[in-house]
Amino acid sequence: MRSTTSTQMMSSQNIEIIIIEDEEDILELLEYHLLKEEYSVSGFLSAENVEAFLEEESPSLMIVDRNLPVIEGSQFVSQMREIGYDIPVIFLTAKDNEKDLEEGFQRGGDDYITKPFNIKEVLLRVKALLRRSGVDTTPKIKYKDLVLDMQKRELYIDNSQIELTNLEFKLLNTFIKNPNRPLDRDFLRDEVWGDDSINFHDKTINVAMNRLKKKIDPKGTKEYFVPIWGVGYKLV
């Protein structure tokens, strides 16, 4: 959330996930894909410093390997449970026999994924466990009375849906991510039109902006946008 504006992020960006994995390549792979999903991620190669981290932070979920140095992963989770931490835990481990599975759940695991793993399955299980834990992962962005549902690609104003084309949605989202900042035409072309900019003309942005303004402010009373002479537009 930008503290200098009234933009409110209601998304996975506010959800912190801890990964404890001693294989650095696997840790980096998990970090990459979770960050791509816009989670906040903290990675550890062992459980050694995690308890001190938990005293300062309040993560929503932990992904824990069982074959860790110093202390075995499920033993660490068991200790955290005894202290009183109830953070949801997914074990991600090569220990795959029935006894290991049972032991993992008995020691405080909420889900269990064996290596080698499919990264898509990991992401789906993360979302499912967060949902079961009551954590809202619905990606929404709110600015004043505008609410963008990023998953459904829908805009709502005062709980009423406003029909936007995909391009108009991308255009509005770009402004909401950059409130009170003048956005020039080159920036908007690259961010919104991207590979389609081959069909871009001098008046393309003006036409798109006029259509967007008529849809979100048909009476022209809210004045969301201010034209910046010689530059482009600003969302205020």
Image (spheres, grey):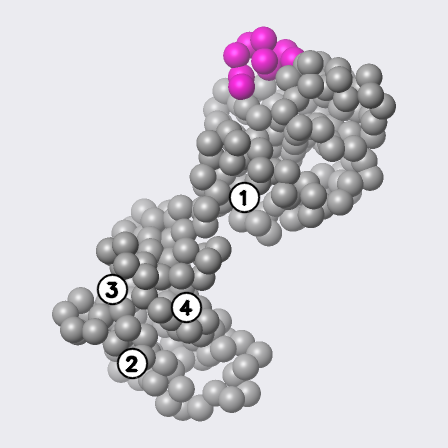
- If you read the primary sequence from the N terminus, does the residue marked by circle 3 or circle 4 appear first? 4
Question: In the image, what residue type sits under mark 1?
Answer: Tyr
Q: Quick one: label 3, few (<14), some, or many (20+) residues within 10 Å?
A: some
Query: Which quadrant of the structure image shows residue 104?
Result: top right
Secondary structure under the numbered disc 3 in the rendered image: loop
Secondary structure under the numbered disc 4 in the rendered image: helix
- If you read the primary sequence from the N terminus, does the residue marked by circle 1 or circle 4 appear first? 1
- If you read the primary sequence from the N terminus, does the residue marked by circle 1 or circle 2 appear first? 1
Give me the disc on residue 39.
Answer: 1
Nearest the viewer among 4 and 129 is: 129
Query: Marks 3 and 1, Cα distance to the nearest angstrom?
Result: 28 Å
Could one spot residue 69 in this view of the protein? Answer: no
Query: Marks 2 and 3, Cα distance to the nearest angstrom?
Result: 16 Å
- If you read the primary sequence from the N terminus, does the residue marked by circle 3 or circle 1 appear first? 1
Residue 147, percent across and down? 33, 56
- If you read the primary sequence from the N terminus, does the residue marked by circle 2 or circle 3 appear first? 2
